[in-house]
Amino acid sequence: MSGFSRRRFLQGCSAALVVGFSLVRPVSSLAAQALGADAPDKPIDGEQLDAWLVVRDDGHVVVYSGKVELGTGIETALRQIVAEELGVAFAATSLVQGDTQLTPNQGVTAGSKTIQVGGRQLRRAAATAREALRLRAAEVLGVPGDALQLHDGRASVRERPEQAVTYAELIGGRSFDQPVDRSAPLLEPASYRLVGTSVPRVDIPPKLFGEFSFVQDIRLPGMLHGRVIRPPITGVSALEVKIESIDDSALPEGVQVVRRGAFLGVVAENEWAAIQAARSLKVQWSHDVALPEMERLYDYLEALPARTSRIVDRGELHPQFEAAAQVLEARYEWPYQNHDSIGPSCAVADVRDDEITVWSGTQGPHQLRQVLAALAERPKEAIRVIYAEASGCYGHNGADDVAGDALLMSQAVGRPVRVQWSREDEHGWNPKGPAMRMRLRGALNDAGEVRGWHFRNWTPTHSTRPGPDGGDRALLAGMLIHGMPEFSRHVGGDRNAPIDYRFEHCRVEVNWLKVADTPLRPSALRGLGAVQNCFANESFFDELAHAAGRDPLQMRLQYLDDPRARAVLEAAAERADWQAARRGEQRWREGTASGRGVAYARYENENAYVAVIADVEVSERGVKVTRVTVGHDCGLIINPDGVRNQVEGNVVQAISRTLKEQVVFGREGVTSLEWGAYPLITFAEVPEVDIILIDRPGEPSVGAGEAASAPIPAAIGNAIFDATGLRLRQAPFTRQRLLAVRDA
Amino acid sequence: MALSLHVNGQAHPVSADPDTPLLYVLRNELGLKGPKFGCGLGECGACTVLVEGSPVRSCVLPVASFAERVVTTLEGLGDADNPHPLQQAFIDEQAAQCAYCIPGMIMSAQALLSRVPEPSEAQIRQALMANLCGCGTHVRILRAVQRAARAMAGERRV
């Protein structure tokens, strides 16, 4: 067996994937434990093949992924990719995810990059493994490697299939001991049997029978329950606050108070006692926070000092505006928005003298480990972060913060502690999708051609995640102890600020604001700035089309050369039976009016293509979206039903964000602290959704997790304009806002 | 004074303070993972269980008020070997994203179907109005409930 190490990672354990409710001294991820895939000497360096996959001695393939399942189906899709490329049955694979001791660091699971980037890394690893197995099989069978076919976990001679050897025989239970080969040949998509099919999601059945353990369901022996008590300046960005005094006279017996700086928590034997204890503690805080009035938010943002970044500067704008037949100007505004996770954030930490284990719904276990090490003042090697799925994650919610809370409480009381945020904690303190203002200016000539396009926005960074900035001060607990950090990175505010339209004279400027200057703590929410920027760009494009007397779909096609961009628009238009016309001729005052609007975006100007046609009904009761048609191209599709599910989710969530969602704040912080004050879309408001997926087997897979969110707001706004002649430029498009624009 | 709860066909002695909302007892004493904590305010429906067939928000009502009642959670409907038609329909329609809200959706849907065996789409939307989903799985959830209703109607006709 030359070429393979005899070092054994795994015993031939073929335990079924049984996830327990209660664990005896659990040190591993539940999946890893059940798979017997928890070897301490397994490498996690992504350069090494053994970091990515292991063939057990029963032939079962354990895949190790640093990207995690956030409820989008990637556990299934990543297994499809590996099973296909390696040549094993889907059922012969399992996935261990997000464990700092076992899985490679693939960065944060975000930005619609799990299939696009993580899938590619796994595909390369699987191809390397397949070729290593081919070499070995050729030696064993005494034939050239290219005479072999590799599938279903065995290598057989093409001409004499009975002459075969299994992967288990070749490598089972042993390591490959070789680097990932970046030039390993990849299978031709035309030969795929598994990729491109709608394999049912493996995580759904256990979730429907109450068998699945979310992070909220983890229980450890001896575990206590913790709750946090936050300062009254809810969710503010510049967090400077002190505890003046604490009155614990009403505290039930046996409850421990944990305090470090302005971080405050209570720990109790049972959960209800912890909840009551948190309510009974009386705390005097001092601070001098005074946020701007919410009514003045956008003027306030625009007046802040900014660092201007000119990201597109093409042609000569000034002469075009001088010579224009028509100049249009408009400003668009988007509010702070929450993450809509139905389960508030939760984590479990077990801090011991020799090691710290934290179970977390984080998007970045390795990144979280780094900042937890700073918080605990321990080396990061002493900390193990294990991913456990939380309620739906649409970006940087409270998952990382609550892990810090749990660590501090466990460290203080010397027992494992589970911290569950309340609904109020989550609505108040989860980092917000940032409020933004966008200003647009466009020049049309006599022929109705766009001669000049000038975009500007005002935005803080859309990422204050644990990462290179700030150490443990990227966690709320760290901020409460040490004060807030400077966030030097600028992320996401520029996303889809540029447009794909072939305008000769074009300028795009992003005005980056300092986090501490902006009222509420910002971070990544699905799509980042793409949602806000596309809202502005695609609405303003319609304003130009109307002014030019043009059909907005035809005018988009006129300025798009990329055939894939045109194809999604044409597919949606054909399905929805789009009739070319100048839109927005109606003048609605009362009764019910209907209309339709179109919008287009290529996510990040380089990934998935999406066209949306929205149909709306507008009445005094407000805006109702009745039907949404989507043309969608994300390259090679791994799992069509999985993509469809993501696109549907984007559509429905983006409608909710466009029509309803807005964080409300006062001078001392967020005041919309439950679903009544921050309403979500309900079943009464969900439209018919019709999706056309354009599969491109010859093109790389790009993400589908966020792209379809970006064009939804403008498609709705454009449909409202078509129905009413009214242009809504500030989200959300509530009934009050609609009537205010009508009556203005 | 120890309470006794009747949950999923079994009696369970309960040691919790009688003021404790039912949800915490189901999850922490009985070890059930179907009912979820979502808001603690009765707003989102993630904690929905059935009490004598009616949907109840277990996060707000004290356990003491359930002493003489028959409580059913997701686990009481069916399991992998013997799934309830709703569970099967949600699998068949792949009607989940994160699925955190789905237990509550299924319990609310079961309450509807036991009252209105062949509901219209509008009736399903109405019955699920107060169950929130953050992932935007609504379209599939509607399809799954319709599918389950058809399956259950088929069973009755056989």
Image (tube, rainbow, N blue to C red):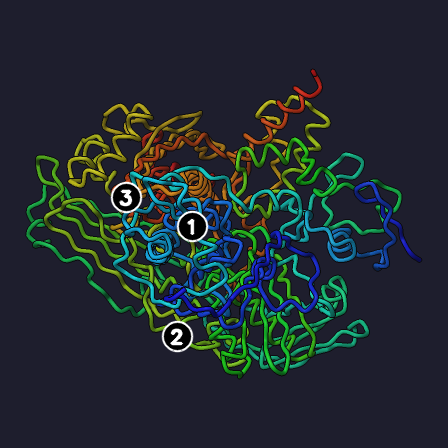
Q: Decide which of tag 2 and tag 3 comes sooner along the chain.
A: 3
Say which chain tag 1 marks. A
Q: Residue at x 71, y 19 (%)?
A: B156
Q: Is residue A739 visible?
A: no
Calculate the distance from the C-alpha at mark 1 to the C-alpha at mark 3. 24 Å
Mark 1 packing: few (<14 Cα in 10 Å), some, or many (20+)? many
Calculate the distance from the C-alpha at mark 2 to the C-alpha at mark 3. 42 Å
Residue linked to disc 2: A469
Q: Nearer the viewer, mark 2 or mark 3?
A: 3
Where residue A209 appears, as percent x and y from the top left, is: 66, 43
Where residue A743 appears, as percent x and y from the top left, is: 39, 37
Farthest residue in the top direction? B157
Task: Choose top left, top right, bottom left or bottom right for residue A113.
Answer: bottom left
Mark 3 packing: few (<14 Cα in 10 Å), some, or many (20+)? few
Q: Decide which of tag 1 and tag 3 comes sooner along the chain.
A: 1
Q: Residue at x 19, y 35 (%)?
A: A557
Residue linked to disc 1: A165
Where residue A297 appears, as percent x and y from the top left, is: 40, 59
- Residue placed most toward the observer, A474 or A328: A474
